[in-house]
Image (cartoon, rainbow, N blue to C red):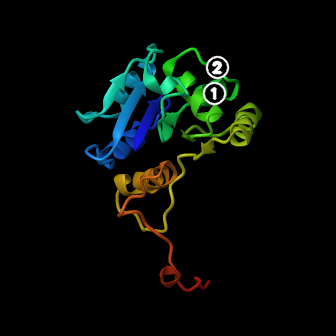
Amino acid sequence: MKIVIGVTGASGTIYLQRLLDQIDFTAHEVHLVMSEHAREVAAQETMAFRIPARVLQHSEDDLNVPFVSGSAFFHAMVIVPCSMSTLGRIATGAGESALFRAADVFLKERRRLVLVPRETPWSLIHARNVVTLLEAGAIVLPAIPSFYSNPKSVSDVVDTVVWRILDHIGLPHARAFRWQEEQRRPPMTA
Protein backbone atom coordinates (compact mmCIF):
# COMPACT_ATOMS: atom_id res chain seq x y z
CA MET A 1 0.00 0.00 0.00
CA LYS A 2 0.93 3.65 -0.46
CA ILE A 3 0.15 5.65 2.66
CA VAL A 4 0.49 9.29 3.69
CA ILE A 5 0.94 10.09 7.37
CA GLY A 6 0.40 13.68 8.42
CA VAL A 7 1.40 15.02 11.83
CA THR A 8 0.26 18.27 13.41
CA GLY A 9 1.21 20.05 16.60
CA ALA A 10 -1.34 18.47 18.93
CA SER A 11 -0.09 16.52 21.91
CA GLY A 12 0.03 12.78 21.26
CA THR A 13 3.33 12.01 19.52
CA ILE A 14 3.27 8.61 21.21
CA TYR A 15 0.40 7.59 18.90
CA LEU A 16 2.52 8.48 15.88
CA GLN A 17 5.56 6.65 17.25
CA ARG A 18 3.61 3.47 17.99
CA LEU A 19 2.00 3.66 14.52
CA LEU A 20 5.42 3.95 12.86
CA ASP A 21 6.70 1.07 14.99
CA GLN A 22 3.95 -1.24 13.70
CA ILE A 23 4.03 -0.68 9.93
CA ASP A 24 6.05 -3.05 7.75
CA PHE A 25 8.05 -0.64 5.60
CA THR A 26 9.33 -3.43 3.36
CA ALA A 27 5.75 -4.06 2.25
CA HIS A 28 4.34 -0.52 2.25
CA GLU A 29 5.41 2.87 0.90
CA VAL A 30 4.95 5.51 3.58
CA HIS A 31 5.18 9.27 3.09
CA LEU A 32 5.40 11.53 6.14
CA VAL A 33 4.52 15.23 6.40
CA MET A 34 5.16 16.84 9.80
CA SER A 35 4.35 20.42 10.53
CA GLU A 36 7.11 22.45 12.17
CA HIS A 37 5.07 22.64 15.35
CA ALA A 38 4.62 18.83 15.28
CA ARG A 39 8.40 18.45 15.31
CA GLU A 40 8.62 20.76 18.33
CA VAL A 41 5.92 18.83 20.20
CA ALA A 42 7.59 15.52 19.33
CA ALA A 43 10.86 16.78 20.80
CA GLN A 44 9.03 17.91 23.96
CA GLU A 45 7.01 14.75 24.46
CA THR A 46 9.50 12.04 23.60
CA MET A 47 13.12 11.58 24.50
CA ALA A 48 13.88 9.35 21.53
CA PHE A 49 11.37 10.01 18.73
CA ARG A 50 12.38 7.85 15.75
CA ILE A 51 11.37 8.03 12.12
CA PRO A 52 12.26 4.77 10.34
CA ALA A 53 14.80 5.15 7.53
CA ARG A 54 12.39 3.83 4.88
CA VAL A 55 9.82 6.56 5.55
CA LEU A 56 9.83 9.21 2.81
CA GLN A 57 9.76 12.60 4.55
CA HIS A 58 8.36 15.74 2.93
CA SER A 59 8.23 19.39 3.89
CA GLU A 60 4.80 20.77 4.74
CA ASP A 61 5.54 23.57 2.23
CA ASP A 62 6.30 21.25 -0.72
CA LEU A 63 3.27 21.28 -3.00
CA ASN A 64 5.14 19.24 -5.61
CA VAL A 65 4.82 15.95 -3.73
CA PRO A 66 2.79 13.35 -5.65
CA PHE A 67 0.02 12.85 -3.07
CA VAL A 68 -1.28 16.42 -3.49
CA SER A 69 -2.65 15.49 -6.91
CA GLY A 70 -5.65 13.29 -7.54
CA SER A 71 -3.88 11.73 -10.51
CA ALA A 72 -1.33 10.05 -8.21
CA PHE A 73 -2.87 7.02 -6.52
CA PHE A 74 -2.42 6.53 -2.80
CA HIS A 75 -4.49 4.13 -0.71
CA ALA A 76 -4.91 5.95 2.58
CA MET A 77 -3.96 9.00 4.61
CA VAL A 78 -3.94 9.34 8.37
CA ILE A 79 -3.27 12.50 10.38
CA VAL A 80 -2.08 11.54 13.86
CA PRO A 81 -2.24 13.46 16.05
CA CYS A 82 -4.63 15.85 14.33
CA SER A 83 -5.09 19.20 16.02
CA MET A 84 -8.54 20.76 16.01
CA SER A 85 -7.03 23.66 14.06
CA THR A 86 -5.96 21.23 11.32
CA LEU A 87 -9.32 19.47 11.43
CA GLY A 88 -11.05 22.83 11.00
CA ARG A 89 -8.87 23.85 8.07
CA ILE A 90 -9.51 20.54 6.32
CA ALA A 91 -13.25 20.98 6.91
CA THR A 92 -13.11 24.31 5.06
CA GLY A 93 -11.16 22.93 2.10
CA ALA A 94 -8.02 24.93 2.88
CA GLY A 95 -5.12 23.78 0.75
CA GLU A 96 -2.22 26.08 1.62
CA SER A 97 0.19 23.31 2.67
CA ALA A 98 1.04 19.79 1.50
CA LEU A 99 -0.81 18.36 4.49
CA PHE A 100 -4.03 20.32 3.88
CA ARG A 101 -3.93 19.88 0.11
CA ALA A 102 -3.38 16.12 0.47
CA ALA A 103 -6.35 15.81 2.85
CA ASP A 104 -8.48 17.77 0.39
CA VAL A 105 -7.39 15.47 -2.46
CA PHE A 106 -8.19 12.34 -0.43
CA LEU A 107 -11.69 13.69 0.26
CA LYS A 108 -12.41 14.74 -3.31
CA GLU A 109 -11.09 11.45 -4.71
CA ARG A 110 -13.08 9.46 -2.11
CA ARG A 111 -9.95 7.87 -0.69
CA ARG A 112 -9.55 6.78 2.90
CA LEU A 113 -8.77 9.76 5.15
CA VAL A 114 -8.46 9.06 8.88
CA LEU A 115 -8.17 11.98 11.31
CA VAL A 116 -7.07 11.24 14.89
CA PRO A 117 -7.84 14.21 17.14
CA ARG A 118 -6.63 13.96 20.72
CA GLU A 119 -7.89 17.27 22.09
CA THR A 120 -10.77 17.39 24.55
CA PRO A 121 -13.25 18.82 25.34
CA TRP A 122 -14.66 19.90 22.01
CA SER A 123 -16.37 23.20 21.38
CA LEU A 124 -19.49 23.37 19.22
CA ILE A 125 -17.24 24.63 16.40
CA HIS A 126 -15.09 21.47 16.71
CA ALA A 127 -18.18 19.26 16.67
CA ARG A 128 -19.56 20.98 13.57
CA ASN A 129 -16.21 20.61 11.80
CA VAL A 130 -16.22 16.89 12.66
CA VAL A 131 -19.74 16.54 11.23
CA THR A 132 -18.66 18.35 8.06
CA LEU A 133 -15.74 15.94 7.64
CA LEU A 134 -17.87 12.87 8.33
CA GLU A 135 -20.35 14.06 5.71
CA ALA A 136 -17.45 14.54 3.27
CA GLY A 137 -16.29 10.95 3.81
CA ALA A 138 -13.49 11.25 6.37
CA ILE A 139 -13.13 8.84 9.25
CA VAL A 140 -12.74 10.74 12.52
CA LEU A 141 -11.13 8.43 15.06
CA PRO A 142 -10.54 10.27 18.34
CA ALA A 143 -7.55 8.97 20.30
CA ILE A 144 -9.73 7.27 22.90
CA PRO A 145 -8.24 3.98 24.12
CA SER A 146 -10.19 0.84 24.96
CA PHE A 147 -9.53 -1.45 27.91
CA TYR A 148 -11.04 -4.78 26.77
CA SER A 149 -7.55 -6.20 26.29
CA ASN A 150 -6.50 -5.42 29.89
CA PRO A 151 -3.52 -3.24 28.89
CA LYS A 152 -0.55 -3.44 31.25
CA SER A 153 1.47 -0.40 30.14
CA VAL A 154 1.11 3.01 28.53
CA SER A 155 2.24 1.47 25.22
CA ASP A 156 -0.47 -1.18 25.52
CA VAL A 157 -3.10 1.53 26.08
CA VAL A 158 -1.81 3.57 23.12
CA ASP A 159 -1.81 0.46 20.94
CA THR A 160 -5.57 0.07 21.38
CA VAL A 161 -5.92 3.31 19.39
CA VAL A 162 -3.12 2.49 16.95
CA TRP A 163 -4.70 -0.88 16.11
CA ARG A 164 -7.94 0.91 15.24
CA ILE A 165 -5.99 3.33 13.02
CA LEU A 166 -4.31 0.39 11.28
CA ASP A 167 -7.70 -1.29 10.77
CA HIS A 168 -9.12 1.85 9.19
CA ILE A 169 -6.21 2.47 6.81
CA GLY A 170 -6.36 -1.17 5.71
CA LEU A 171 -3.38 -2.62 7.61
CA PRO A 172 -4.87 -4.75 10.39
CA HIS A 173 -2.29 -5.79 12.98
CA ALA A 174 -1.96 -9.42 14.09
CA ARG A 175 -1.67 -8.42 17.77
CA ALA A 176 -4.84 -6.29 17.75
CA PHE A 177 -7.37 -7.32 20.35
CA ARG A 178 -10.53 -8.67 18.74
CA TRP A 179 -13.72 -9.01 20.73
CA GLN A 180 -15.06 -12.56 20.67
CA GLU A 181 -18.03 -14.20 22.34
CA GLU A 182 -15.87 -16.34 24.65
CA GLN A 183 -14.05 -13.26 25.95
CA ARG A 184 -17.17 -11.92 27.60
CA ARG A 185 -17.03 -11.98 31.34
CA PRO A 186 -19.95 -12.63 33.65
CA PRO A 187 -21.62 -9.44 34.93
CA MET A 188 -20.16 -7.98 38.10
CA THR A 189 -22.29 -8.31 41.19
CA ALA A 190 -22.66 -5.65 43.84
Q: Residues within 10 Å of mark 1 (few under 14, many from 20)?
A: many
Quarter the C terminus occupies: bottom right
Please give the residue where the numbered disc 1 appears in the rendered image.
90
Pick whichever, 102 or 11, lies toward us: 102
At 42% from the left and 43% from the top, the residue drawn is: 15
Q: Residues within 10 Å of mark 2 (few under 14, many from 20)?
A: some
**Residue 132 falls in image quadrant:** top right
Pick whichever, 14 or 27, lies toward us: 27
Residue kind at label 2, given as amino acid type? Ala
**Residue 38 falls in image quadrant:** top left
At 45% from the left and 38% from the top, the residue drawn is: 12
Q: Are marks 1 and 2 in contact (CB under 8 Å)?
A: yes
* Left/right of residue 37 with respect to residue 126 in the rendered view: left
At 27% from the left and 33% from the top, the residue drawn is: 47
Residue kind at label 1, given as amino acid type? Ile
* Left/right of residue 91 with respect to residue 30 in the rendered view: right
Q: In the image, is residue 61 above or below residue 139?
A: above
Report if residue 41 is visible in the image. Answer: no
Q: In the image, is residue 35 above or below residue 45?
A: above
Report if residue 105 is visible in the image. Answer: yes
Please give the residue where the numbered disc 2 appears in the rendered image.
94
* Left/right of residue 138 with respect to residue 125 in the rendered view: left
Pick whichever, 15 or 52, lies toward us: 52
